[in-house]
Image: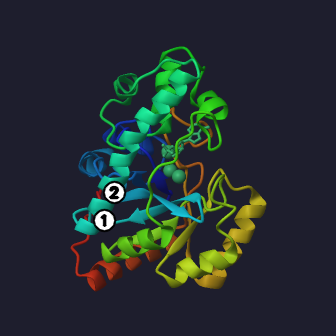
């Protein structure tokens, strides 16, 4: 069974529509794919509808932007109730700030000699409900300022870059609690990828595990084999679920093809079991998997 638990659609910064993503997952030989757009649930209906048609199980998820000691930490939430008001409200706040920050980035770029405005960004962002730096990058490509997203990040948009603007995000512990209260399961996304490695040492991961964190995404392209080995040991010591995923973004990010990393069947089943228990404890109706 081939299981990929982290993929983005055009609802955030991926380039495939949610249904198209599910069909691509089948073409890549996957049996299970999780849709985990940044800070938005809007792709769930189309993706779960496409599941039966494509012959792929779709796990509804979301990748939540959080903050820990001044660094950005991404937390994957699987099967939370999207209608749980505290979670829905918090994500709406994050998306609202994402939108407001586009203006600030446009001003910085314009002052630096690359005239751009928010409408240029919205024009390339299509139907996205979670807007971010990748969309600004796409607008810069459209204007001929840079060749691709990578160059836009390397030269302008990366943390510390001349057009970098931070965004609002909840504290990591608060997001983990909200996910549990919504009947979902929280997994740290690419903990030792750029940005979050500095703040997510073994002690901090233990602390988060004590506050409800259920798993760690160990097999991810941002982790070399030494990082994977060390993270696997941390997960084993804390009895955390170990996942592996592509973090697919369509053509928006190279080196993240669907299925490039996968999750073991036993770990996936543990995750589903934890989600069922979380939903029962929280008294929430769990969202349905998009089934074959
Ligand atoms: P934001 O959420 O707006 O702060 O933007 C962060 C997103 O940009 C991440 O989810 C990544 O997928 C994407 N990203 C970061 N670096 C790059 C890069 N070099 N090329 C393409 N996408 C990137
Ligand atoms: Fe992304
Ligand atoms: Fe991420
Ligand atoms: Zn991601």
Query: Which residue occupies the foreground of this view, 63 or 26?
Result: 63
Residue contact at pointers 1 and 2, CB within 8 angstroms: yes
Distance from Cα at disc 1 to Cα at disc 2:
6 Å
- Say what secondary structure mark 1 lies in: helix
Whether residue 23 is visible: no
Q: Which residue is mark 2?
A: 91
Residue at 30% x, 72% y is: 182
Q: Position of residue 164 (x, y in %)?
A: 57, 39
Can you say which quadrant of the picture contains the C terminus? bottom left
Q: Position of residue 91 (x, y in %)?
A: 33, 57
Q: Position of residue 66 (x, y in %)?
A: 48, 60
Query: Which residue occupies the foreground of this view, 216 or 163?
Result: 163
Query: Which residue occupies the foreground of this view, 244 or 117?
Result: 117
Determine if the C-beta at disc 2 is less than 8 A from ligand 1. Answer: no
What crowding class fits label 2: few (fewer than 14 Cα within 10 Å), some (14-19), or many (20 or more)? Answer: many
- Say what secondary structure mark 2 lies in: helix
Res 155 quadrant in image: top right
Q: Which residue is mark 1?
A: 87
Q: Residue furthest front?
A: 111
Determine if the C-beta at disc 1 is less than 8 A from ligand 3. Answer: no
Q: Position of residue 228 (x, y in %)?
A: 70, 64
Residue at 37% x, 38% y is: 10
């Amino acid at each position: 069974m081939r299981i990929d638990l982290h993929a983005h659609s055009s609802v955030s910064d991926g380039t495939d529509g949610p249904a198209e993503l599910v069909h691509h997952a089948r073409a890549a030989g996957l049996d299970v794919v999780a849709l985990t757009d940044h800070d938005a649930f809007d792709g769930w209906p189309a993706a779960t509808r496409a599941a039966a048609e494509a012959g792929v199980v779709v796990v509804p998820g979301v990748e939540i932007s959080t903050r820990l000691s001044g660094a950005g930490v991404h937390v994957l939430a699987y099967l939370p109730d999207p209608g749980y008001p505290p979670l829905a409200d918090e994500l709406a706040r994050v998306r609202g700030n994402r939108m407001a920050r586009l203006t600030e980035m446009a001003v910085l770029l314009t002052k630096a000699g690359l005239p751009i405005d928010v409408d240029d960004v919205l024009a390339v962002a299509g139907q996205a409900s979670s807007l971010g730096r990748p969309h600004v990058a796409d607008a810069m490509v459209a204007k001929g300022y840079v060749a691709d997203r990578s160059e836009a990040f390397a030269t302008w948009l990366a943390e510390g870059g001349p057009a970098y603007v931070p965004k609002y995000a909840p504290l990591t512990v608060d997001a983990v609690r909200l996910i549990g209260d919504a009947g979902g399961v929280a997994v740290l996304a690419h903990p030792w990828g750029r940005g979050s490695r500095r703040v997510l040492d073994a002690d901090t991961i233990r602390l988060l595990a004590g506050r409800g964190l259920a798993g760690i995404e160990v097999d991810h392209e941002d982790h070399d084999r030494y990082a994977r080995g060390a993270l696997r040991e941390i997960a084993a010591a804390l009895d955390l679920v170990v996942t592996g995923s592509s973090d697919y973004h369509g053509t928006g990010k190279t080196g993240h093809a669907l299925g490039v990393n996968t999750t073991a069947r036993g770990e996936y089943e543990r995750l589903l079991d934890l989600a069922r228990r979380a939903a029962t404890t929280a008294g929430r109706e769990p969202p349905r998997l998009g089934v074959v």
